Image: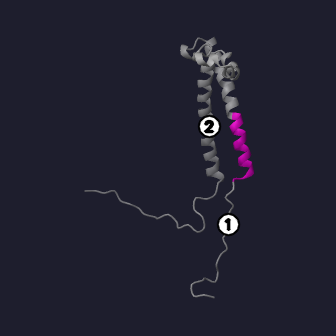
Amino acid sequence: MGKYQSLARKKVKEKSRDVHVAWRGIGCLMMLVIPVISIAASVITIDYGLNNNWTIPYQLLGFPRYPDWFYASSGLMTLLSPITNTRHFYAYAVTSILYMILLAGVMSVLYAFVYRLVGPPRYGPLDVPPPNVKLKKYKR
């Protein structure tokens, strides 16, 4: 044995840095579910608001209108015809983006809370404990 090696050296097990398969599946599912929920909620919200005389900006209501050169191109109009035929499309789009931000924020807070409860400890076995310093309030 060498001079600087300890006799009772603990073996530290290497943790894999890969994301668990279940978390990948949940993330993929959330990427699909959150937009669907937000679009459905925005359609319901805008329709409810229109029926109950909510003040919705008039610029967001009606059918979308494109520049004139869009209408000259048959390829663009083929791609954008479902959007052109959707009444109140801009209101639905803005509201669904707001719902996506809200749902993603709520999911982030919930994930952080669960990770804090179930996740690994803050300090590992090889970390130095935090300093235990107590400062007194400075008085002049």
Question: Going 57% across and 84% down the picture, which residue do you hit?
Answer: 4
74 on left or right of 5: right
Nearest the viewer among 67 and 91 is: 67
Q: Secondary structure at mark 2?
A: helix
- The amino acid beneath tag 1 is Glu
Q: Is residue 25 magenta?
A: yes
Above/below status of 137 relative to 38: below
Where is residue 71 drawn, in percent x and y? 63, 16
Magenta-colored span: 19-33
Q: Is residue 5 magenta?
A: no
Q: Work out whether mark 1 precedes mark 2 in sequence or the reverse, and give the earlier one.
A: 1
Q: Residue furthest left?
A: 140
- The amino acid beneath tag 2 is Ala
138 on left or right of 74: left
Q: Mark on residue 104?
A: 2
Quadrant for residue 39, please give it.
top right
Where is residue 48 drawn, in percent x and y? 64, 16
Above/below status of 23 relative to 61: below
Which residue is under mark 1?
Answer: 14
Q: Mark 2, residues whose alpha carbon is within 10 Å: few (<14), some, or many (≥20)? A: some
Where is residue 91 drawn, in percent x and y? 60, 20
